[in-house]
Amino acid sequence: MNLSTLNWLISNTPVAYPFPIKTLIARSKKKLKNIQWRHPKLQFFKASSISVTDDNVVYLKFNRSTVLAQKGELIVVPNDDYMPRRISFFGYWSEDLSKFLASGINKNTMLLDLGAHCGLVSLQTFNLSFVPKLYAVEPKKDNLKALRTNLKKIEQLCNIEIVDAAVTNIKGKTGNLYRQAGATMNSSVNSCLPGLCDTTESEITIETVKTIQSMELCKNILSFAGTSEIALKSDLQGMDVKILSEFSDIFWSKVRIGSIEICSLQYGAESEINLLIRRLKNFKQIFIDDQLTREISFEHLSKFYTSNSNKTLNLYFKRDL
């Protein structure tokens, strides 16, 4: 190998200079982590981080086209220890969920994203199947900044409404986001329903946010939807059952397809899950996989929710099977 070939490898791949030998492994790992591939055929990572702002968000530039973004486009995500790295490597976020939702969307469907985070699932669903209307709910300030930035690229083609509030069933204009003490920001953050659970000494307040009552939110959703059917994606950090069970029969009659995250928590009440099950019986079958092959009975769903196991289960349902 001549010197020019070695220099090319070092410039365009994770290969590090061999000397000093003692630090070769450490330098190679560091380069592999930080390198932005220059040669198109060697662009191993789908996206590269180009900047971190004072608002604590990361700008990712895509090296290849994926379901999330075209080559050269920018996506904004919160600066945590997980999301930027995963998107850089794979180029998408919950792609199977987006594909499932897209399969039930037509020109008369509104996508309802409860717990929208930074809007990646909504954006992917739009890229897979044109979404004429989008209603997104997200309370966390860092996520909202990224959400608004990401959805700007489709605002000319999609009628978008963003609600910057946490959903609750108690009166009040503000509430606290909190997490378990010692947990990371990526763990289960009760970000969508402050006030439903009493904050204990083991929980740390993150920030204070605006709130909106579930009944009022349901009314606003139906007003925005108009005659459109609804594709539902709900990820309310453990409070999905409490909120969705309070949404009206009119709302549920409009839902064409949906995915709900169900959490078995210590405050799970049988009356809440039974009320939600009554709504879900319009779909005849409920599944725990996006391919609709693993069916779960309503009896098992009720037992899971009240089991206090602290586990989560993703439900998938579609009106036309």
Image: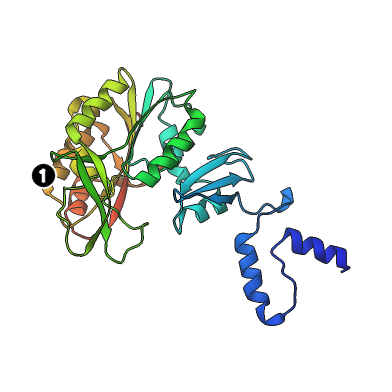
Front residue of 57/68: it is: 57
Q: Is residue 293 visible?
A: no
For label 1, the residue is: 271
| Position in image of residue 181 (x %, y %) | 27, 64
Q: Which residue appears farthest toward the top when viewing the image?
A: 227
Q: Is residue 53 visible?
A: yes
Q: Which residue appears farthest toward the bottom when viewing the image?
A: 22
Q: Residue at x 30, y 51 (%)?
A: 313
Name which quarter of the figure residue 11 lies in: bottom right
Q: How is the image coloured?
A: rainbow
Front residue of 43/16: it is: 16
Q: Residue at x 71, y 81 (%)?
A: 21
118 in relation to 104, above or below: below
Q: Label 1: few (<14), some or many (≥20) within 10 Å?
A: few
Q: Is residue 75 left or right of residue 144?
A: right
Q: Quadrant of the N terminus?
A: bottom right
44 in relation to 135, above or below: below
1 in relation to 250, above or below: below
Q: Is residue 262 left or right of residue 157?
A: left
**Type of residue at label 1?**
Ser
Q: Quadrant of the C terminus?
A: top left
Q: Which residue appears farthest toward the front when viewing the image?
A: 54
